[in-house]
Image: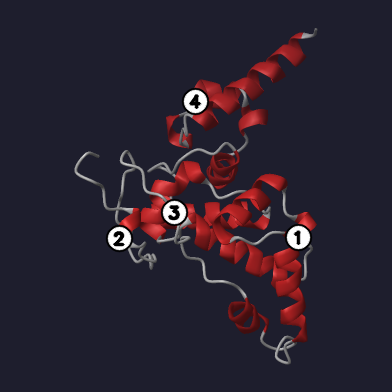
Amino acid sequence: MSSGSNSSGQGLKLVLDLVKKQTPWKNIPMKVRKKYSHQLGTEEKWERLRIPWALQLHLPHHGTMGVGKTSFYYRALEAFSTKLMPFPYHYQYEVVGLLGITAAKYYWDLIAGALEHERGFDEVPSFTARDVVRLLSIDRNAYIQIANRCKRDPNWAKKRKAVIKTHMPAPSPQGDVEISAWWQVRPSHGAKLALLPEKNYKLSEAE
């Protein structure tokens, strides 16, 4: 293997390591910038790509990114939703706590978007579809029924979002969810979460 290939491989490995550590441009040593200028690019390009890289590698928000936490996690949800990916549970503390968006609400918006653009349920990846069924009770047959009802609605052509909201079930927890004693409950800012029946969260004296 040539020295050029080795240098290129080392450069790519270095870039990946810097990205994983969420290193801002100003913290990259000058000698490293010069030696691996081809792989690192310019400061403007490096800082611009840090957020897409972080989302691709499922990294959390970093204070040196130049955007606030709220903007970062909104972008994360948008990126995941656009690709019909499962709810980013590794971000759930921030997504629910900061944005007030639960997994059920995320999937509701995802399915509503698919209906609006007349996408088939088969386009939804299997892991995402499984979670949709678990949280919204919408499987392929239910999706087709909802889509047909929407298309028959006289307002479908001009008011798709409103029509979908009328025919989609609300994104609320199922009534038979069992709360385990080891669960942690954290309040979210602005989240409109449906309350579960008392029998689902009230523990006995033995518990």
> In the rendered image, which residue does mark 3 sit on?
177
Q: Of callouts 2 and 1, which one flags the residue occurring earlier in the amino acid sequence?
A: 1
The reply to whether residue 105 is in sight is yes
> In the rendered image, which residue does mark 4 sit on?
30
* Pointer 1 with pointer 3, Cβ within 8 A: no
Label 3 crowd (10 A; few <14 / some 14-19 / many >=20) = few
Q: Of callouts 1 and 4, which one flags the residue occurring earlier in the amino acid sequence?
A: 4
Q: CA distance from mark 2 to mark 1?
A: 35 Å
The reply to whether residue 68 is in sight is no
Instruction: Please determine whether, in this image, residue 121 is positioned above or below residue 4.
Output: below
Looking at the rendered structure, the secondary structure element under dot 2 is: helix
Across and down, in percent, residue 48 comes to: 56, 47
Across and down, in percent, residue 34 comes to: 58, 25
Look at label 1 and name its amino acid: Phe
> In the rendered image, which residue does mark 1 sit on?
121
Q: CA distance from mark 3 to mark 4?
A: 55 Å
Label 2 crowd (10 A; few <14 / some 14-19 / many >=20) = few
Look at label 2 and name its amino acid: Glu
Q: Nearer the viewer, mark 3 or mark 4?
A: 3
Q: Of callouts 3 and 4, which one flags the residue occurring earlier in the amino acid sequence?
A: 4
> In the rendered image, which residue does mark 2 sit on?
198
Look at label 3 and name its amino acid: Val
Looking at the rendered structure, the secondary structure element under dot 3 is: loop
